[in-house]
Image (spheres, rainbow, N blue to C red):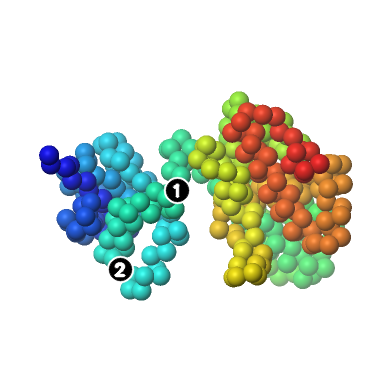
Amino acid sequence: MSTVTRFFVGVDLHKTIIQICVLDQGGEIVEERRYQAPDLVAGMEVIGNLMKYKKRGRIAVEAIGVNRWFVNGLLEHGFEVVVCDPTKLNLKMLGRKTDRRDALEIARRLMLGDIDRNATTYYPSDDEYGKRKVIRSRHKLTQMRQGVINQIRSMLNAYKITGLGSDLTAKKSIRQLWRMEWPTEELAVVGQVWITTLEHLGEAIAHLNNQLKEMARDVEVSRLSDLPSIGPVSATAIFYELGDVIRFKHSRSVASFSGAVPRVYQSADTAHHGKLTKRGNRVLRHVLGEWAVRLMSSDERVIRWAKPRLRRSHKNKVRMALARRLVIGVYKMLRTGEAFSMERCLGM
């Protein structure tokens, strides 16, 4: 009785180049090919050339910013697709790094099952991807606005100009900035540019805030909105950045995904816990950190929990320790359906 041959396809995807490597179950190279795909039509032709491996093959693609059209096209044609985390593959550690070697290594890891065990990553749907884009665009715009505010502050401090208040985004402050007389014509031009940019960024952020409030009407998101010291914008960001919580094996995976865990250096009997890894979800870590700051200043239970820790650790360490406990609490709530308990998060 003949056995059915299985194929394992590794794809090294770039903006205009697609490198393909196909292995059989014995690890022998069946096909290697390099495609030029400058547009979507050419890219779909590449998918058409892979149709012969559809029934008996699996395809592994790295999770990079330009892969959505390719992965979506494969899924629409019924392929079995695995999206893998490039950082966990460590392809750069193999010595010479070329597209051909990368595609071969991805196919080999897929054949051996290494990708399934250690390197698979979450692939959000187009709806989730769009919602995350709203959240991340707002996060990026707020960072840009803070940069503009810093530029304006530097000009004000240079000439010891005071009396504008602490919030330069307020309408009153912006009106005062427009009426301000600068020492030179060049400074006036620069000031006008920064103030105009500040206004435009404020309008864009307000528009995205409205969209986030619409997203917050979801039943699951509204449960997060009822948590202490958290508003609809933060609740929406946490919910959609976490995504499908079923994919996390345990609470440690959630903490690692949020980037709220320390680096660990262990050898023999010694172990050192250093700074945060910062390899997790940056937006989620930022929102959790802000939530922790609000709780540490307003919630009596959190203040009691943090007080002895602040005596021996820096406030930022305590803040991220609290953020880690909060995201695990939210994970438990979303996964099991049980009510969020601040006392349980704090171990009280």
What is the crowding at mark 1: few (fewer than 14 residues within 10 Å), some, or many (at least 20)? some
Vertical arrangement, residue 347 with respect to residue 312, above or below: above
Q: Position of residue 265 (x, y in %)?
A: 61, 68
Residue type for callout 1:
Thr
Q: Which residue is mark 2?
A: 98
The local secondary structure at tag 2 comes to loop
> Which residue is rendered at x = 63% and y = 28% of the image?
337
- The tag on residue 121 is 1
Vertical arrangement, residue 320 with respect to residue 48, above or below: below
Residue type for callout 2:
Thr
Vertical arrangement, residue 162 with respect to residue 334, above or below: below
Left or right: 186 as drawn, with respect to 126: right
Query: Marks 2 and 1, Cα distance to the nearest angstrom?
Result: 23 Å
Mark 2 or 1, closer to the camera:
1
> Which residue is rendered at x = 65% and y = 33% of the image?
333
Q: Position of residue 212 (x, y in %)?
A: 60, 36
Between residues 176 and 335, which one lies in front from this camera angle?
335
Left or right: 6 as drawn, with respect to 282: left
Left or right: 98 as drawn, with respect to 49: right
